[in-house]
Amino acid sequence: MKLFIYATIFLSFFLTGCQSTNTIYIVRHAEKSTEPANDPHLSIEGKLRAEVLKFLLKDKNIKAIFSTERARNVETATPLSGLINIPIQYYGNDTLPAFLQRAVNLKKNSLIVGHSNTTVTMINSFDLPHTITNIADDDYDNMFIIKVKKGKAIKIYERVYGAVSPHVK
């Protein structure tokens, strides 16, 4: 009986420790078309990239999905949202610091879909070493993976996903 109690206590501490680490995935929206001019939708290539994103993240235990309300961002997040049945929550670019702190404090694996300029701003705010300081207009393949432990970003990984963008890295 004592062994069972000790095993239960150990497992409880182990699971609690595992829950204190989470991952935030940040991507720029996928390729956009030119129409409508004020809020373009995804192009065919962008729709394909959004599908790739869905398959990359489907088993990552995503519990929150964030996007601006721009069509291209929502359309990038929608395939994953539909597959895992997690609604998209909207954030405003004018509230990035508070929004990011909220995302970190959630302690849940999350996807954030941003824009070329806001994605870099978000990455910079974590104060972790990284190499990408600018995202070109034709650059859509970056994925930033931020490891968070006990409410603090501890590591950032830079990856590419889907078709390689035509820009020169």
Image (spheres, helix red, strand yellow):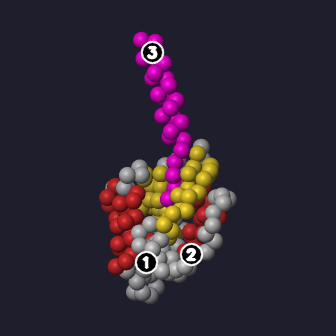
Q: Are marks 2 and 1 in contact (CB under 8 Å)?
A: no
Q: Amino acid at mark 2?
A: Lys
Q: Which mark is residue 3?
A: 3
Is residue 70 something one can see in this rendering? no
In terms of sequence position, does the residue under pointer 3 or pointer 2 come before the other? 3
* In the image, residue 125 above or below residue 148: below
Residue 33 % position (x, y)? 40, 83
The mark lying in front, picked from 2 and 1, is 2
Which quadrant of the figure contains the N terminus?
Answer: top left
Magenta stretch containing residue 6, yes or no? yes
Instruction: Reply above or below: 126 against 131.
Output: above
Estimate how packed mark 2 is, as few (under 14), some (14 to 19) or many (20 or more) residues with alpha carbons within 10 Å. few
Q: Name the side, left or right, on which 113 lies relative to 101.
A: left
| Cα separation between marks 3 and 1 | 56 Å
Residue 4 visible in the displayed image: yes
Q: Which comes sooner in the sequence, label 3 or label 1?
A: 3
Residue beneath the point at 35% across and 60% down:
55
Residue farthest along the left direction in this orientation? 83
User: Magenta stretch?
Assistant: 1-25
